[in-house]
Image (cartoon, rainbow, N blue to C red):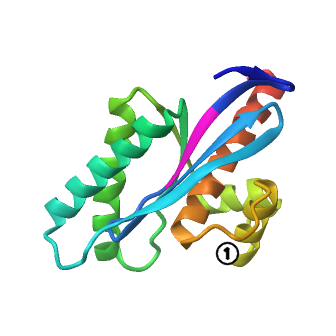
């Protein structure tokens, strides 16, 4: 990545893991600025067997990674307070996404939903709609990113950009 005013550019991919829909969002962090590159969602069909769905996520996500060539990643951690059964397919999809990133040598940092809200909105108890609107404003987008999973992934990318900037500024 070429250096720009404000420091070197970093390409970050954010990931919102899911089996039905895995969101992704790519940003460039240049100094303290975060610039939108692209976002989207990998959706699978519920009538397909789970192994086929996981393979589709794996291959599709590798295409995204190879196209945008991120150097680092931020991923939302899983949080299921009530239903462990619904957590298992999402955890499997998350594993496939992590495998894809590891295969390309991309460091992944995980963030809780509360940490992402804190990084984007400034408070961990923010509503989902507030996070999506602030992602839109931070990235200077005309509209709130759609679908929701892509907006959440962009939030994870923004969190990673701010996390790395904070670690750099604090000397960590």
Q: Main secondary structure of the magenta part?
A: strand
Q: With 148 as the anchor, is 2 left or right in this view?
A: right
Q: With 60 as the anchor, is 144 left or right in this view?
A: right
Please name whichever residue, 146 or 135, is drawn nearer the observer in this view of the structure.
146
Question: Could you tell me residue 73's position as x and y percent?
Answer: 53, 40
Question: Could you tell me residue 25's position as x and y percent?
Answer: 56, 52
Residue 40 visible from this viewpoint: yes
Membership of 12 in magenta stretch: yes
Q: Residue at x 76, y 73 (%)?
A: 130
Q: Quadrant of residue 39?
A: bottom right
Q: Residue at x 24, y 56 (%)?
A: 56
Question: Could you tell me residue 167's position as x and y percent?
Answer: 74, 30
Q: Is residue 2 above or below residue 147?
A: above
Question: Could you tell me residue 64's position as x and y percent?
Answer: 42, 45
Membership of 148 in magenta stretch: no
Q: Quadrant of residue 101?
A: top left
* Quarter of the picture holding the N terminus: top right
Q: Is residue 78 above or below residue 111?
A: below
Please name whichever residue, 33 or 143, is drawn nearer the observer in this view of the structure.
143
Mark 1 = which residue? 128
The residue stretch that appears in magenta: 11-15
Q: Residue at x 13, y 69 (%)?
A: 49
């Amino acid at each position: 990545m070429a250096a720009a005013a404000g420091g070197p550019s970093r390409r970050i991919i954010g990931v919102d893991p899911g089996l039905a829909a895995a969101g992704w969002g790519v940003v460039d962090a240049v100094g303290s600025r975060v610039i939108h590159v692209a976002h989207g969602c990998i959706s699978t069909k519920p009538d397909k067997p789970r192994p086929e769905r996981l393979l589709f996520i794996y291959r599709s996500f590798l295409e995204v990674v190879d196209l945008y060539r991120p150097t680092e990643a931020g991923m939302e951690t899983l949080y299921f307070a009530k239903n462990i059964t619904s957590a298992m397919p999402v955890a499997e999809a998350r594993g496939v996404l992590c495998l894809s990133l590891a295969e390309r040598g991309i460091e992944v940092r995980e963030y809780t939903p509360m940490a992402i809200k804190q990084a984007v909105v400034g408070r961990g108890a923010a509503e989902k709609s507030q996070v999506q609107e602030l992602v839109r404003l931070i990235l200077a987008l005309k509209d709130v990113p759609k679908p929701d999973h892509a907006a959440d992934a962009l939030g994870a990318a923004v969190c990673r950009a701010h996390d790395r900037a904070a670690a750099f500024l604090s000397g960590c």
